[in-house]
Amino acid sequence: MPQPYDRVFNFSAGPSTLPVPVLEKAQAEMMNFRGTGMSLMEMSHRSAPFEEVLHNAEADFRALLGIPDRYKVLFLQGGASTQFATIPMSYLPAGKKARYVITGSWGKKALESAKILGDAEVVWDGKSGNYNDVPNDLALDASDDVAYTHFTSNETIQGVRFSTDPNWGGPLVCDMSSDILSRPVDISKYDLIYAGAQKNMGPAGVAIVVISDEMLAKGPDGLPPMFDYRVHAENDSMYNTPATWGIYICGLVYRHLLDTGGLEAAAERNDRKAKLLYDAIDGSNGFFKGHAVPSARSTMNVTFTLASDDLTKAFLKEAQAKQLDGLKGHRSVGGCRASIYNAFPEEGCQVLADLMRDFASRNG
Ligand SMILES: *Cc1c(COP(=O)(O)O)cnc(C)c1O
């Protein structure tokens, strides 16, 4: 079936596909935003219409995740990568150490910044298995000398994820960039969650930070204001000009998610979509090899390889001819990666799974 507007099935890892109704709404409101006579992009961030956009986006985001009042929600810039630095700058004082659980490429990058800024210790590293697993049963107790434990709930490049919120002692910090809003999360287990918007929430340019009041109060004095979460919290994410357009689109995505059943329903759709692909991998008699061990399989990024580069190239070519776009894997894993975030349609997973079976039967 041709897709609306001749759109492809967009498996891009990020920035990534957005819900068509969200894009249509943004298009309809583009030239004259809700009777203001201008585009939202052209409007002061101090204006009442934008303040309402920001307020509604936050309220809907809170409703989706069930965020308690004792947490602040910040809409920042600088992507998830800036938070890699701001977090240790803020919460890793001299004399304490931070624990990093490394399950893939993004965790390694977070660690790199932390090491520059303080004492960061690796407590688990999946390197020996080329990051094909996560330590779901790792035990970590609270300790006075531990400032926080950092982990990545879903590693976008390797396609591995934690199946539940970990029960580790002490302040818990999580990079949820590639699976935020893909399933319900128990926010009360965390002290700080952050995510770049461009995987599951909206366009690039917005980073969201959810932080407990307790964690926020631990921030040191003397930070440059742009790197001080308290400054952003006190100014309702308007210390400087926020990414107004990005926040607006995120808000439309949140509303769309609420209107389609919230995160329980999203998780069911995502499980179904991922299962179509993992079943095709598992049913291929080894023609396709999944990168992740089954217990760590991501529902957002499905990574798999074929026996040779030539086969991979031929498969990607056939996929492209079927409007299956962006399936080439990251060089560190090779093969293919199907990024199937919230907004990716189930039909696209079905088309890919059918092609996988067909291709394997012709080339196996
Ligand atoms: C994409 C991604 C990042 C980097 O996000 P930026 O917004 O580009 O800084 C960090 N962590 C994870 C898990 C990601 O998927």
Image (cartoon, rainbow, N blue to C red):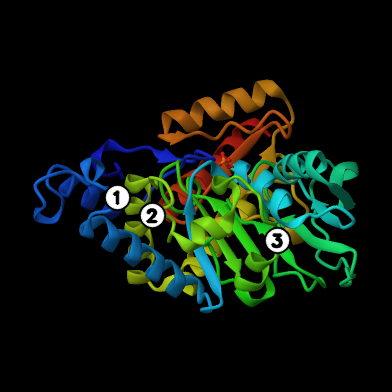
Q: Which residue position is annotated with label 3? A: 173
Task: Measure the alpha-carbon separation of dots 1 and 3.
Answer: 30 Å
Q: Which residue position is annotated with label 1? A: 45
At 51% from the left and 72% from the top, the residue drawn is 65
Q: Which mark is residue 121?
A: none
**Mark 3 falls on what kind of element?**
strand
Task: Measure the alpha-carbon separation of dots 2 and 1.
Answer: 16 Å
Indicate the quadrant containing the C terminus: top left, top right, bottom left or bottom right.
Answer: top right
Q: Is residue 201 left or right of residue 327?
A: left
Under mark 2, the amino acid is: Cys
At 68% from the left and 44% from the top, the residue drawn is 85
Q: Which mark is residue 250?
A: 2
Under mark 3, the amino acid is: Val
Tell me the mark number nearer the camera, choosing from 2 and 1.
Answer: 1
Q: Which tag, 2 or 1, sits closer to the chain's start?
A: 1
Residue 72 seen: yes
- In the current view of this chain or complex, which residue is farthest to the front? 222
**What percent of the width, then of the height, locates residue 270?**
52, 61
